[in-house]
């Protein structure tokens, strides 16, 4: 699902098409010093969601791009995304948008 406010459109699709692997996380707060390069960590996209092995890369100092190794449903803008390494919380922020593979 996507909302295009400028054209006043809501895009929907069948469930298999709603699973995504890539999205942005905005307003990131770090508990540890932020990694300078792409790194592996587990990512949880909402409360009680299982952590998914992911690769995370900085877009700028306050925004990250997340690639989850397994596609997930319910990656929704405005929800929390939290990065973990084992039981350690590395940081987290708010899901911004899903990203197409060509972006």
Image (cartoon, rainbow, N blue to C red):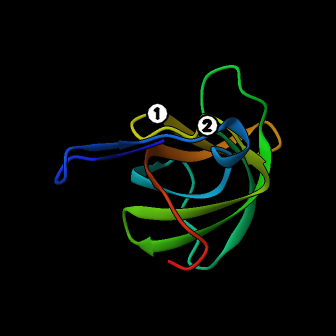
Q: Decide which of 16, 27 is in the foreground and name it.
A: 16
Q: Outermost residue toward the left?
A: 6
- Give the spatial CA distance, label 1 vs label 2: 7 Å
Instruction: Write down the quadrant of residue 10 in the picture.
Output: top left
Residue named by callout 2:
45
Circle number at residue 79: 1
Q: How many marks do you count on the picture?
A: 2
Residue closest to the eye, 70 or 60:
70
The residue at the point 70 percent across, 20 percent down is: 48
Which residue is located at x 65 percent, y 38 percent?
14
Q: What element carries label 2?
A: loop
The picture places residue 93, in percent across and down from the top left corner, at 45, 44
- The mark nearer the N terminus, 1 or 2, is 2
- Confirm or deny contact between disc 1 and disc 2 (CB under 8 A): yes
Residue 12 lies, with reference to residue 85, above or below; the image says above
Instruction: Determine crowd level at label 2: few under 14, some 14-19, many 20+ residues with C-alpha closer than 10 A.
Output: many
Mark 1 burial class by Cα count in 10 Å: few <14, some 14-19, many 20+: some
* Residue that appears at 65% across and 76% down: 38
Residue 42 screen position, x and y as percent: 76, 48
Image quadrant in which you'd find residue 56: bottom right
Q: In this view, does 17 lie above or below 103?
A: above
- In the image, residue 8 lies at what x, y percent? 20, 44
């Amino acid at each position: 699902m996507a909302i295009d406010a400028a054209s006043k459109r809501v895009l929907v699709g069948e469930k298999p098409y709603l699973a995504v692997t890539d999205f942005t996380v905005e307003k990131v707060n770090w508990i540890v010093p932020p990694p300078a390069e792409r790194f592996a960590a587990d990512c949880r996209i909402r409360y009680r969601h299982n952590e998914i092995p992911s690769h995370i890369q900085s877009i700028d100092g306050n925004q990250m791009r997340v690639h989850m190794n397994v596609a997930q449903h319910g990656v929704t803008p405005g929800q929390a995304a939290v990065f973990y390494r084992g039981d350690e919380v590395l940081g987290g922020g708010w899901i911004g948008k899903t990203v197409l593979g060509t972006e």
